[in-house]
Amino acid sequence: MADILDKMKVVFQGQPVPYVRTTQTMKYMPKAQNYLGYRSLLATYIRNLYPEWIIPERPEDKKLSKLWLEEQKRYQYRLGVNAYTMRDNMDWDNCYKCVADCLQQAQVMWNDKMIRKILPSKIELDKANPRLEITLIKELVPLPLSLPRGSRMVLP
């Protein structure tokens, strides 16, 4: 069982923008530009709102880099995304991908694959107050019990 370290709750006002696959040629299309701008804006908003969540840069030194990576792998996250939109044609999965990319870009986590659980989430129509509500829970995974090489664990 992992220990809960911290919880982040973010409400970002405005129409949520879903994930758009951006290849080299696609990133110049208006839809992709809109997504990349929204992702950057949301990442900056999260960084400013929760500066204590920003992880340090990965060191250049190989030994330090390996230690840094081992430390980062000790954390896992639970993510909830509630999207309230002006239109009824948004896919929740693409909204989730956008938020996961934003959290990685904001340097809240080193890789969005560290999101291990999805909290109950929804997408609803709210023309009067479109917004994105994000809940992120950071957990510390206990270190595995290590035995000396060649030894066997004997159960009673």
Image (cartoon, rainbow, N blue to C red):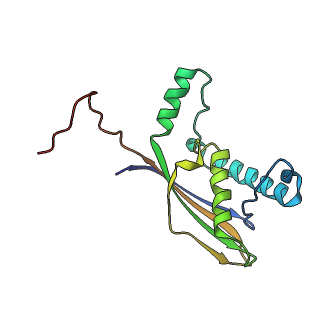
Quadrant assignment, res 99: bottom right
* Residue 152 to residue 60: above or below: below
Q: Residue furthest front?
A: 150
**In the displayed structure, does residue 94 sit left or right of residue 31?**
left
Viewer-proximal residue, 52 or 111? 111
Q: Residue at x 48, y 48 (%)?
A: 76
Question: In x, y percent, where is residue 84?
Answer: 67, 73
**Position of residue 22 measured from the top left corner of the image (x, y, whole percent):** 78, 53
Which residue is depicted at the point 48% across and 40% down?
73
Residue drawn at x 55%, y 69% is 121
The one of 34 and 91 positioned closer to us in this rendering: 91
Q: What count of labels does the image hold?
A: 0
Picture quadrant where residue 94 is located: bottom right
Q: Nearer the viewer, residue 110 or 42?
A: 110
Residue 58 on image: x %, y %: 60, 30
Q: Quadrant of the C terminus?
A: top left
Residue 87 located left or right of residue 5: right
Asked which quadrant contains residue 134, the reply is bottom right
Residue drawn at x 72%, y 60% is: 19
Q: Position of residue 74 (x, y in %)?
A: 44, 40
